[in-house]
Image: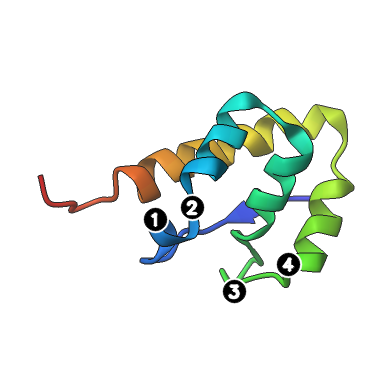
Amino acid sequence: MEIRFKFDGDAKDNLTWNDLEILESGKIGKSKEILARFVVDQNEKPVPFDAALKDLGSLKMSQIEGVMESFTKLMTNDAINPPNADS
């Protein structure tokens, strides 16, 4: 199963300080709830929250690290330091 994420133009408004602290702390259960808000399908359309939670919950341990790395990279590149951001 491939999990895809997308941050739209409002991504910064969809992540809170508390979310970032949870992600940084590695609290897996809470992290899953945060990640689920940004899961998209192969057409980059949002996946309903409950379906995204179910998909994330079915990941094997061997897949979790890659998914977390993918999300963190996307979050850093597109939400925290978006392309064409004003300096």
**Earlier sequence position, callout 1 versus callout 4:** 1
Q: Residue at x 46, y 44 (%)?
A: 75
Residue identified by numbered label 4:
49
> How many angstroms separate mark 3 from mark 4 (CA)?
12 Å
Q: Disc 2 marks which amino acid?
A: Leu
Label 1 near label 2: C-beta < 8 Å?
yes
Tag in front: 2 or 4? 2
Label 3 near label 1: C-beta < 8 Å?
no
> For the residue labelled by badge 4, is the local secondary structure a helix, a strand or a loop?
helix
> How many angstroms separate mark 2 from mark 3 (CA)?
19 Å
Tell me where residue 24 appears, x and y as whole percent.
56, 28
Q: Quadrant of residue 47?
A: bottom right
Say above or below: 35 vs 20.
below
Tell me where residue 72 appears, x and y as whole percent.
52, 37
**Earlier sequence position, callout 2 versus callout 4:** 2
Say above or below: 7 vs 63.
below
Q: Is residue 55 left or right of residue 20?
A: right
Count of all numbered marks drawn on residues in the image: 4
Residue identified by numbered label 1:
12
Q: Disc 3 marks which amino acid?
A: Lys
Q: Is residue 61 left or right of residue 72?
A: right
Tag in front: 1 or 3? 1
> How many angstroms separate mark 1 from mark 4 (CA)?
18 Å
Tell me where residue 17 appears, x and y as whole percent.
47, 43
- Residue 33 seen by the camera: yes
Label 3 near label 2: C-beta < 8 Å?
no
